[in-house]
Image: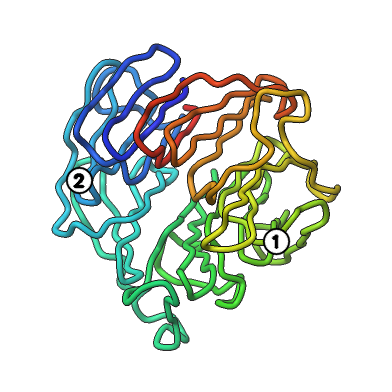
């Protein structure tokens, strides 16, 4: 199932089925091992309008909780099926399967927090968070580095410094983590204890979105925040990045950034959503593409679930 969230609706593209209209899809998360509260959907949750979380059923949305803020920005599902939610101001809360909201107070007191600054706005952001299969939590602060908790939020360790300027973080099996940052593509094979970096093959180092599929990585890169030249690349981790779409069907460049949440990959399939309302899909790891949706409002996030 390929779920696409835009600034106005949530859709299952595989079935051309719209779950909801007149909603701004802020974030989407899924835990295949968690049983949904409704229907048979595998633990899929959606953050709407930055203020409420719904469960996704086969044909509908089931309200789970309304947050006491309109500033929720990111979401990931923990190993227990609860949601970890990032808020404006770089705060974290958890939301239980029963809809109970609990602040993650430890994150508000991590060392160096008072030095964090957002060069693009007046408030700090948690634009991307991720959770591993063994329940390690990662939070990226814009701009305050990447932080990891190995004990479900009771304590935190800084694994990337603020100057790295990370825009998206994703996790994979066996300790693999990847980030798209202002300094290129970074990855770790030990849950962020050590990192490797590359810009080799990129036309410019400013990376905004990343996806993992085994040892294959997909990353978007551009010339900067106000770019007119955003592109999608792929590599086997440790090798040179190469442009996607060499077999055809995907533009070589887009006149904007391909932003956080815009790319997803699973089992050799890759999908890319764009600000101008297109979705592109590859069945062969990013060589050949087809356009499977057009005329949408800006795509915010898409995920295979």
Residue at 19 percent across and 38 percent down: it is 64
Q: Which mark is residue 205?
A: 1
Q: Nearer the viewer, residue 201 or 55?
A: 201
Count of numbered circles in the view? 2
In primary-sequence order, the first of circles 1 and 2 is 2
Q: Is residue 173 visible?
A: no
Task: State the SS at label 1.
Answer: loop
Which percent across, then down, holds residue 246? 78, 30
Q: CA distance from mark 1 to mark 2?
A: 35 Å
Which percent across, then down, holds residue 84? 36, 53
Task: State the SS at label 2.
Answer: strand
Location of residue 296 (image quadrant): top left
Location of residue 118 (image quadrant): bottom left
Q: Nearer the viewer, residue 32 or 271?
A: 271
Residue at 55 percent across and 54 percent down: it is 169
Q: Say whether residue 227 is left or right of residue 276.
A: right
Q: Say whether residue 32 is left or right of residue 244.
A: left
Which percent across, then down, holds residue 259? 50, 49
Q: Which mark is residue 52?
A: 2
Q: Nearer the viewer, residue 126 or 32?
A: 126
Residue at 70 percent across and 36 percent down: it is 214
Q: Nearer the viewer, residue 181 or 204?
A: 204
Answer above or below: position of 99 versus 152: above
């Amino acid at each position: 199932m390929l779920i696409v969230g835009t600034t106005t609706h949530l859709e299952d593209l595989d079935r051309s089925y719209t779950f909801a209209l007149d909603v701004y899809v802020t974030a989407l998360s899924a835990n295949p091992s968690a049983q949904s509260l409704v229907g048979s959907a595998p633990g899929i949750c959606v953050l709407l309008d930055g203020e409420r979380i719904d469960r996704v059923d086969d044909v509908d949305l089931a309200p789970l909780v309304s947050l006491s803020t309109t500033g929720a920005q990111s979401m990931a599902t923990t190993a227990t099926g609860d949601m970890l939610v990032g808020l404006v101001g770089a705060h974290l809360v958890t939301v239980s399967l029963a809809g109970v909201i609990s602040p993650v107070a430890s994150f508000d007191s991590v060392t160096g927090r008072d030095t964090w600054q957002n060069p693009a706005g007046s408030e700090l952001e948690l634009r991307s968070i991720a959770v591993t299969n063994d329940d390690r939590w990662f939070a990226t602060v814009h701009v305050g580095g990447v932080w990891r908790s190995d004990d479900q939020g009771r304590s935190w360790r800084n694994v990337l410094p603020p100057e790295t300027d990370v825009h998206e973080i994703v996790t994979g099996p066996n300790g693999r983590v990847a980030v798209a940052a202002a300094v290129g593509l970074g990855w770790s094979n030990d849950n962020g204890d050590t990192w490797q970096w590359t810009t080799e093959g990129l036309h410019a180092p400013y990376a905004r979105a990343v996806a993992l599929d085994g040892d294959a990585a997909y990353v978007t890169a551009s010339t900067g925040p106000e770019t007119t030249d955003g592109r999608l690349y792929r590599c086997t981790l440790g090798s040179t990045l190469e442009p996607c779409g060499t077999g055809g069907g995907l533009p070589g460049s887009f006149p904007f950034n391909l932003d956080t949440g815009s790319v997803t990959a699973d089992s050799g399939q890759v999908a890319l959503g764009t600000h101008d309302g297109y979705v592109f899909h590859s069945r062969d790891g990013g060589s050949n593409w087809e356009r499977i949706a057009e005329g949408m409002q800006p795509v915010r996030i898409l995920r295979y679930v």
